[in-house]
Amino acid sequence: MGEGYQPGSREDFDRLYRTAYPRVYRTLSVILRDPDEAEDCAQDAFVQAFQAWKRWRPDAPAEAWVHRIAVNRAISYRRRAKLRSVGEILRRLGRPATSTDPAEAAARPDLLTALRSLPPKLAVAIVLRHYHGYNNREIAAAIGVSERTIGTRLRQAGERLRAELDSPFSLAPRTAFPSDNSETYAED
């Protein structure tokens, strides 16, 4: 479960940094709504993680551990920061760059705006689940709450996103052949 990392190994931490930094940065970008603030918090989180690297326990995924540190840093930062208007956020961020990463390819501007309107605890759950593919157990371990709490946060985030977005938003897997509601079937 420890992904081959050894606590205290500088080489392993360097490998963890190279692997996890892009995902941590994207998560913090959603939470903080500002790429510069996300980069600052991500760097602070990795400094804090490096200082605690000797104490990391390999029974938990290293990337989830770093995500927990980063999310806690971002939540603390966001509590202190003034909330900015949506117009200023869009002006600062501009258009997302195209990428081959499926998480970035799926990042529609209206979805990003809706994600940024969520409270941090809800945004973290939805981003870790649907952008990064963590399951509820991994998210719970990373954030330090129960799996049930993660389920509740995902449900609340889904409800808020559905209310914010013009098109229906669903956390459920899509069906292969969605049926039209106007179809009728012969009765026996």
Image: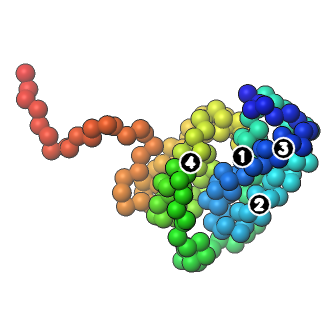
Camera-nearest residue between 69 and 107: 107
Q: Marks 2 and 4, how far apart in space? A: 19 Å
Residue 35 in sight in this render: yes
Q: Marks 4 and 3, how far apart in space? A: 23 Å
Residue 70 x %, y %: 75, 52
The residue at 86%/42% (across/down) is: 11
Query: Which residue is under mark 3?
Result: 13
In the picture provided, is 115 more to the left or to the right than 141?
left
Residue 45 x %, y %: 80, 54
Q: How many marks?
A: 4
Q: Which mark is residue 19?
A: 1
For this orientation, the residue located farthest to the top is: 188
Q: Which quadrant of the figure has residue 135?
A: top right
Quarter occupied by the C terminus: top left
In the picture provided, is 153 more to the left or to the right than 47?
left
Q: Amino acid at mark 3?
A: Phe
**Badge 4, how many Cα within 10 Å: few under 14, some, many 20+?**
some
Determine the secondary structure under disc 2: helix
Q: Marks 1 and 2, how far apart in space? A: 17 Å
In the picture provided, is 77 more to the left or to the right than 173?
right
Is tag 2's residue or tag 4's residue first in the polypeptide sequence? Answer: 2
Q: Marks 2 and 3, how far apart in space? A: 18 Å
Determine the secondary structure under disc 4: loop
Mark nearer the viewer, 1 or 2: 1
**Badge 1, how many Cα within 10 Å: few under 14, some, many 20+?**
few
Camera-nearest residue between 178 and 145: 178
Is tag 4's residue or tag 3's residue first in the polypeptide sequence? Answer: 3
Query: Which residue is under mark 2?
Result: 41
Q: Is residue 40 above or below residue 45?
A: below
